[in-house]
Image (spheres, rainbow, N blue to C red):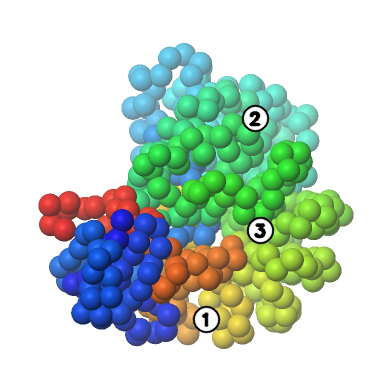
Amino acid sequence: MGILWFGGQIYTMEHEGSMAEAVFTEDDTIKAAGTYEKLYHSFYDDIDKEVNLQGRTMIPGLVDSHLHIVMHGEKLLRLDLSQMTSAGEIKEALQNRIPYLSEGEWLIGEGWNENQWENPSIIHRTELDEIAPNNPMMLTRVCRHALIANTKALEMADVGKETSDPQGGRIVRDDNGDATGYLLDNAQDLVKDSLPDVSQSYLEQVIKIAVDDLHSKGLVGGHTEDLNYYGYRKTLDAYQNALSGDRRFKAHLLVHHDVLDELISDRLRYLSGTRYVELGAVKIFSDGALGGRTAWLSEDYSDDPGNKGFAIHETEELERIIKKAREHGLPIAVHAIGDRAVQEIADLIHKYPLENGARDRIIHGVILNESTLDRLKQLPVVVDIQPSFMTSDFPWVIDRLGEERLKLSYAWKTMMDHQISCAGGSDAPIEEVAPLVGIQAAVTRRSTIDHEVYHPEEKLTVFEAIQLYTAGSAYVVNQEDSRGLIAEGYRADFTILGEDIFQADPEHIQDIPIEMTIVDGEIVYERNPSRM
């Protein structure tokens, strides 16, 4: 079907300020962008439909370069703790949920963050036991690098006084050596492995719920890491079933290293898949997170002397995983927040370069130093940043790192000035999934906690911030010649905004309504269908 789109501000994003009066698309492809008169006459016989944007703004379709779609769907289904501001409020919400559970049924909560409480403290398992002694309970921290479990859950996981800390994880204990219920990084798996298995139909349900929500936020696609949590084949099949037929969404699935053998056994390769589900780089975790002081730093945490965080893998194991990926021509996508973690990954990418042109990525890359910055600018690697991290981490992160280290932390403008390619995402459900929230964070760097602006020299322009979610997300998956711009030959993926984002107050970008989301020329979300 040939569609002529016109009547609004159309930003092609080819260059800053580049615009078109109209765009003609046919099926899933942009055939031309230019003046309305020229396109109308050039494609007169092929125009089946005209869409008047009525003054709205069209930009290339936004793509979240790092999120967890299944987890986002589960957050929409489960008890959401992310906006609660005290331990008491969380315990009250848990108490209110108990009457709806049968004895022995798991109670799962998502997204608590003690840094936004008036009195930050970690809830003890015994406090949860008072609420539900006979129901196993798991409350996942916003960063997904820590959880709290009650005694019933610890018993089911066989976590006791004699249980050793796993590599890359820690069981927090009291003075008597008893587990408090607070588990960090890989220690979380002790409890998570005790959760009942889920069906493929359940996974299809949460994927559909998540994707419908992502459409409403203006997202045409996302790079997600889900394949290891509920089983590789079951999850892959669930994605392929959920994203077939009328539900259009471009899901790029990172492949956790624990399921790499299954990918190889299936004889699949990088970017193989279906129209809307493709396989991506090998996902590896190299460290933890700042919230639990498990991100791996070169120097001690300023508020925890003697603690530098830790590596998830021994260096030899990390090297083995990367070498295996390289043997099969696969890029890697490595979670690295601390500067020591970023340095190790950058050194290994340098040691084991990828020869086929596919691109590695460092996910997060929050803390750099001069050495890591110099190494990164020498490598064909993309840093996958999450602008919302900065706005939710300040001011408490100042105590974690100290002012000196913060000069090269969340250093987006510095990376770009050093010609280091960046893509933008949310890490949802850790942060809010809406890309306009991330764009505003990149432009303003204003904390959502104390509303102060931190390190304004690292602010991005609106153009640069949008690029993170358009050209940047396309570049990291080697699709910069077909996605991320409004130009001839590119995919007909668009996000339609209710206001001109380039003229809007930067402090209110996140308030701009999403009017339409278009994937491959088809409207998949429309806020007010009768108005278009």
Residue 179 appears at what percent x and percent y? 66, 34
Q: Please, is residue 434 above or below residue 378 in the view? A: above
Q: Does 464 sit left or right of 263 as displayed?
A: left
For the residue pair 291 and 232, the one nearer the viewer reads as: 232
The residue labelled by disc 2 is 193
Q: Please, what is the three-letter code of the amino acid marked with disc 2?
A: Asp
Q: Which residue corresponds to the image point at 66% horizontal and 66% vertical from the top-left?
A: 359
Q: Are marks 3 and 1 in contact (CB under 8 Å)?
A: no
Residue 481 seen from this side:
yes
Quadrant in which residue 131 is drawn: top left
Q: Please, what is the three-letter code of the amino acid marked with disc 3?
A: Ala
For the residue pair 214 and 338, the one nearer the viewer reads as: 214
Secondary structure beneath dot 2 equals loop
The label shown at residue 333 is: 3
Q: Are marks 1 and 2 in contact (CB under 8 Å)?
A: no
Q: Are marks 2 and 3 in contact (CB under 8 Å)?
A: no
The residue labelled by disc 1 is 413
Residue 452 appears at what percent x and percent y? 38, 73
Q: CA distance from mark 2 to mark 3?
A: 24 Å
Q: Residue furthest top?
A: 103
Residue 251 appears at what percent x and percent y? 50, 50
Query: Split into 4 quadrants, where in the image is the N terminus?
Result: bottom left
Q: Please, what is the three-letter code of the amino acid marked with disc 1?
A: Lys
Q: Does 266 sit left or right of 492 as displayed?
A: right
